[in-house]
Image (cartoon, grey):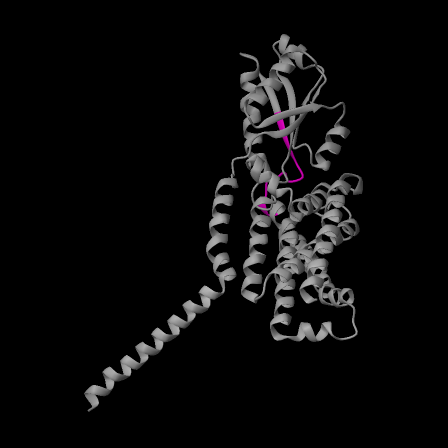
Amino acid sequence: MTHFRIPILHFRRLSGFTAMLRKEFIQMRRDRITLGMMVGLPAVQLALFGYAIRTEVRHLPTVVMDESRSVQSRALVDALRNTGNFDVIGDVRSRDEIRSRIEAGDVRAAVIIPPAFANDLKRGKQAQAQVIVDAADPLASTAAINSASLAARAAVARTPIDVRVRPWYNPALKSSTYIVPGLVGLLLSITLIVITSMAIVRERERGTLEQLVVTPIDKTSLMLGKIVPFALVGYVQMTVILTLGKLLFGIPLQGSLLLLYALSAAFIVANLGLGLFVSTIAQTQAQAMQLSFFFMLPNILLSGYMFPREAMPAPAQWIGMLLPLTYYLKILRGILLRGAGFTRMWPEALVLATFATAVVALSVRRFSKTMG
């Protein structure tokens, strides 16, 4: 009798497992949104990021201060351009203008050729020139630094040229100097988008959100009460990262922290709006998580946090221009590493403020409609 109980027990377990498995597949088939996200989003992201991510950085925007204005100086500029690492976009008249353009972020390198350059070459003396490179991003600047000396040898045959390269803002080419400030924006995005959307969807799943809606509280106050605490958490995170970055990694704090905190408000509001927008689409916490990471991966890979945007194809750069983190990284690195002021950062701040206004208005409208 005992010999028959064991096969029967195994049969019952197998039939129970089969029934459970069938039930899960039926439930998965009914939840087509989650299934589509699980299958479709990874395929889209693989195609996008596999095409967009490049680490070899070339074509740095470059200005020239040519005080020699000679055939020899133009030959040096041409040799630098022919390396493919420098794209000459204009001329400047002073070192102050060079610093101003680099702080603004529209220039990554500068070539300075002194007045005596041509005369020194004609006399057989060693002529000197200088190449200044924004080394805040060591990955983007290393190739330019290495190619500058090689270009000098090809500029004028059989004539010695001493091209001195000066890396600004990160002379030791430390990757932490570039990465750690970006962590402020990245972690803020994770906190404000993922946690905000998950918290609101969780309230909806539990039924407590509907209970709050029927209370004598207008929907604007309801939403503000839900998202303002996350904004305060974001500022706390920001303070912790900046403090530890200074203590552990020696991250320079060149600019005004008060300005950085003020300009961060638009970025925080924009991400809170995105989190709210995700919560109006997702019906479950699993869907909210999937959609949040759909927003997060482009933020990480296309904003310039990890990979230089100059190395990306044009379509990937256009997508990156739609991401709030792209502009916030310019603000972070501009203020912290270059000491830029509001006059240099206001274009990025204006874009973030416009984005925040638009996405919050859209999210509030969708939220009101879904809760109506």
Q: Magenta includes 167? A: yes
Most extreme residue toward the top, as rendered? 122
Q: Horizontal placement of 44 versus 372: left or right?
A: left
Out of 353 and 149, give the one closest to the viewer: 353
Out of 160 and 305, give the one closest to the viewer: 305
Assign the C terminus to one quadrant of the image.
bottom right
Res 209 → quadrant:
bottom right
Assign the N terminus to one quadrant of the image.
bottom left
Total marks shown come to: 0
Q: Residue at x 56, y 31 (%)?
A: 58
The answer to whether residue 174 is visible is yes
Q: Residue at x 72, y 37 (%)?
A: 103
Range of magenta residues: 164-176
Q: Magenta includes 201? A: no
Query: Residue 120, percent across and down?
Result: 65, 12
The answer to whether residue 172 is visible is no
Q: Residue at x 58, y 44 (%)?
A: 302
Out of 173 and 59, give the one closest to the viewer: 59
Q: Is residue 190 above or below residue 52?
A: below
Query: Residue 161, percent across and down?
Result: 59, 18
Query: Residue 63, percent across and down?
Result: 68, 26
Q: Horizontal placement of 67 versus 318: left or right?
A: right
